[in-house]
């Protein structure tokens, strides 16, 4: 493997492991799949079901089922798409924002003790790493996708 490939794999693996670790050890009442969908809606903003399915690499029926659960909990709102009245747009409700913030607080609560163990220079490196990851995400958003995205089989 080339250095950028190794670096990219290491970065993705570390970010995913940290996220899974925080979720596994956190205590929250939102099922993980629903928490992921709430976070995706928070990131994308009001979206059609097809947009959410594509972004989550899920089928529309899978996302529709998850959205029905979110809607039953009062965590999402449906509205007519202003660009196409036949379609609906899903957005986070105030309760959905609160549920997502609860999940984020719970994950932070398990991560905070580990961060508290780091000294000043290590915390500075974490801050730099966050800045670099944000720059990487911005660059990735602007870069052309080198291959087709995964299709749900």
Image (cartoon, rainbow, N blue to C red):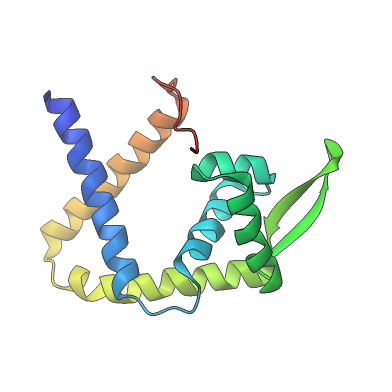
88 horizontally vs 13: left or right: right
Question: In the image as oriented, which residue stretches furthest toward the front?
Answer: 153
Q: Nearer the viewer, residue 33 or 121?
A: 33
Number of numbered discs visible in the structure rendering: 0
Quarter of the image for the N terminus: give it: top left
Residue 128 visible here: no
**Image vertical order of residue 84 relative to residue 70, above or below:** above
Q: Nearer the viewer, residue 128 or 93?
A: 93
Q: Quadrant of residue 119?
A: bottom left
Question: In the image as oriented, which residue stretches furthest toward the right?
Answer: 85
Q: Quadrant of residue 64?
A: bottom right
Residue 4 visible here: yes
Provide residue 133's location: percent of width, then percent of height. Answer: 31, 42
Q: Nearer the viewer, residue 4 or 148?
A: 148
**Image vertical order of residue 16 relative to residue 104, above or below:** above
Provide residue 87's location: percent of width, then percent of height. Answer: 81, 43
Provide residue 111's location: percent of width, then percent of height. Answer: 27, 70
The residue depicted at 12 percent of the width and 26 percent of the height is: 3
The residue depicted at 48 percent of the width and 37 percent of the height is: 153
15 horizontally vs 84: left or right: left
Q: Nearer the viewer, residue 121 or 6?
A: 6
The residue depicted at 66 percent of the width and 74 percent of the height is: 73
Provide residue 75's location: percent of width, then percent of height. Answer: 65, 68
The residue depicted at 58 percent of the width and 46 percent of the height is: 44
């Amino acid at each position: 493997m080339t250095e950028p490939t190794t670096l990219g794999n290491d970065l993705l693996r570390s970010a995913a492991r940290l996220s899974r670790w925080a979720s596994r050890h956190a205590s929250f009442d939102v099922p993980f799949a629903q928490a992921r969908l709430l976070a995706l809606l928070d990131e994308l903003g009001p979206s059609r079901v097809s947009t959410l399915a594509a972004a989550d690499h899920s089928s529309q029926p899978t996302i529709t089922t998850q959205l029905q659960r979110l809607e039953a909990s009062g965590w999402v709102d449906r509205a007519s798409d202003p660009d196409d009245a036949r379609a609906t747009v899903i957005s986070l409700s105030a309760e959905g924002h609160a549920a997502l913030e609860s999940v984020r607080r719970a994950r932070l609560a398990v991560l905070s003790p580990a961060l508290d163990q780091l000294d000043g220079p290590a915390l500075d490196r974490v801050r730099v790493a966050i800045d670099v990851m944000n720059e990487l995400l911005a660059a990735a958003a602007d870069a052309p996708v080198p291959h087709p995205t995964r299709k749900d089989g």
